[in-house]
């Protein structure tokens, strides 16, 4: 491995388009980050990555680690991201992590460990991530849990309201994200698989939360 490759790439297309670079040797790991909730096209990955590298005065060889979101979320977006990473890693000795897209987003919150992250799935359903649990919940489930005192966060550009449900907005915190990523295991490109949540998970309604 290139010993000067001290930068990590984060790529997630499960919900919108997230690509970020951060230094693994700096106290302030944020280098560059691009997030667009509406873009999931594969041809934008290489273009955006080149822009971030130029902006940060880095070269492609400076990347020694890739963290790719495996879902749950957009099937097409997840498959595009995994295919890109498999191709990227085939050209060199690069460390790789396959990470939960929900866990990654939750890790970027500055809120307490008791809080939950909510990401819209299809209409009326939400992917939900806690400290050690991921489920899919209906709108009614979320309202019930809110009434029980659970606090939910949503990462996006705007506040989202659906009926009586209001989801709070939170910005990306790359420092918190880097700490979480460092606790996740490495894998090989051959081990990359999409991560799905089944509707039956909603039956648990977060028992034991």
Image (cartoon, rainbow, N blue to C red):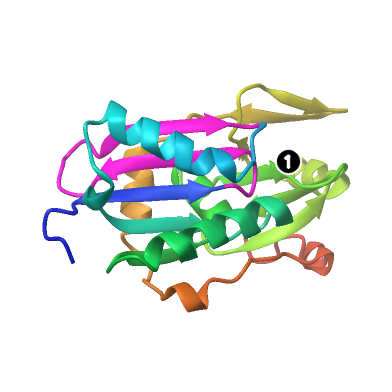
**Label 1: few (<14), some (14–19) or many (≥20) C-alpha neighbours in 10 Å:** few
Q: Position of residue 106 (x, y in %)?
A: 52, 47
Q: Position of residue 184 (x, y in %)?
A: 38, 66
Give the structural element (helix, strand or loop) at label 1: helix
Q: Where 203 sits versus 71, above or below?
A: below
Magenta span of residues: 13-37
For the point 39% across and 68% down, which residue is it?
Answer: 90
> Magenta segment: does it hold 145?
no
- Viewed as shown, does residue 133 lie left or right of 104? right
Of residues 90 and 11, which is closer to you in this image? 90
Which residue was labeled with disc 1? 146
For the point 65% across and 43% down, which residue is it?
Answer: 15
For the point 83% across and 66% down, which residue is it?
Answer: 203
State which quadrant residue 147 falls in: top right
Count of all numbered marks drawn on residues in the image: 1
Q: Position of residue 95 (x, y in %)?
A: 31, 66
Of residues 57 and 122, which is closer to you in this image? 57
> Magenta segment: does it hold 23?
yes
State which quadrant residue 167 falls in: top right
């Amino acid at each position: 491995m290139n010993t000067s490759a001290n930068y990590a790439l984060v790529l997630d297309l499960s919900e919108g388009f997230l690509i970020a670079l951060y230094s693994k040797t700096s106290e302030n790991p944020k280098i560059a980050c691009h997030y667009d909730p509406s873009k999931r096209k594969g041809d934008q990955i290489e273009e955006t990555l080149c822009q971030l590298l130029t902006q940060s005065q880095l070269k492609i060889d400076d990347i020694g680690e890739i963290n790719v979101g495996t879902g749950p979320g957009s099937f097409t977006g997840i498959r595009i991201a995994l295919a890109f990473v498999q191709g990227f890693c085939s050209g060199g000795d690069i460390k790789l992590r396959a990470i939960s897209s929900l866990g990654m987003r939750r890790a970027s919150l500055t809120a307490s460990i008791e809080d939950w992250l909510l990401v819209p799935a299809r209409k009326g359903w939400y992917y939900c991530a806690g400290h050690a649990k991921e489920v899919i919940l209906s709108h009614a489930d979320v309202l019930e849990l809110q009434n029980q005192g659970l606090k939910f966060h949503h990462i996006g550009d705007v506040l989202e309201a659906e009926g009586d449900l209001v989801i709070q907005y939170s910005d990306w915190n790359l420092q918190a994200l880097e700490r979480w990523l460092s606790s996740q295991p490495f894998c090989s490109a051959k081990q990359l698989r999409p991560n799905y949540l089944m509707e039956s998970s909603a039956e648990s309604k977060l028992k034991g939360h």
